[in-house]
Amino acid sequence: MAELGKLAAAQLSDLGAYLGPGTKANGRLLFEGTTTIEGEVEGEILVHGNVNVGEHATIKGKIVCTSALIRGKVTADVQADKKIEIQPPGVVVGDVITQSLVIGDGAILEGHCSMKREKEGKVLPLMRPDSAEAASEKNPS
């Protein structure tokens, strides 16, 4: 029985935040983890994770997230660190900034798009001073 409770708790934690149909929110909203929005939001939405905008959702305000899947209507800018996907009947009226953009057949994007590369996080090995000196001694100019 305890294992069943743990399984249900794990599934709920994977679900994340959910604003259902008929929900109306106004202001600045901050979410941790996966977020699904099915209602109406007017204001800024900040999600530390993925956001799913449902078919009947209406958002009037900026969205900043890791990834976004949009099937509803968003009237504002959308900024996603990794990916923005707009699927029918999704409509975005505003600018988008992301690394990867997918627009499904029948979805609408009305605005500017800026594609940015992944942040350079690579560390290149440095030559040791003694290696550089040894190399210059072997090949005198």
Image (cartoon, rainbow, N blue to C red):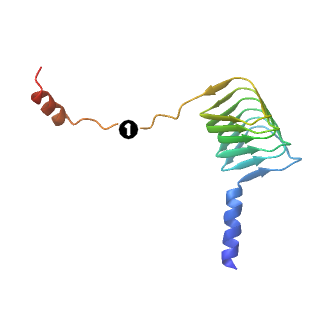
Q: Is mark 1 on a helix, strand or loop?
A: loop
Q: Considering the image in quadrants, where does the C terminus appear?
A: top left
Q: Is residue 116 left or right of 106 when viewed as pictured?
A: left
Q: Position of residue 138 (x, y in %)?
A: 10, 30
Q: Position of residue 26 (x, y in %)?
A: 81, 38
Residue at 66% across / 76% down in the picture?
Answer: 3
Q: Residue furthest top?
A: 141
In this rendering, the answer to whether 11 lies above or below 117 is below
Tell me the crowding category of disc 1: few under 14, some 14 to 19, or many 20 or more residues within 10 angstroms, Cα based: few
Residue at 59% across / 34% down in the picture?
Answer: 99
Q: Is residue 16 left or right of 121 when viewed as pictured?
A: right
Residue at 72% across / 48% down in the picture?
Answer: 35
Q: In which quarter of the image is residue 95?
A: top right
Q: Which of 38 and 83 is in front in this view?
A: 83
Q: Which of 83 and 30 is in front in this view?
A: 83
Q: Where is residue 64 in the image (x, y as percent from the top left)?
A: 67, 36
In this rendering, the answer to whether 15 lies above or below 58 is below
Pointer 1 residue: 123
Q: Which residue lies furthest to the right in this view?
A: 22
Q: In which quarter of the image is residue 47?
A: top right
Q: Nearer the viewer, residue 61 or 80?
A: 80
Q: Is residue 137 left or right of 112 when viewed as pictured?
A: left
Residue type, label 1: Val
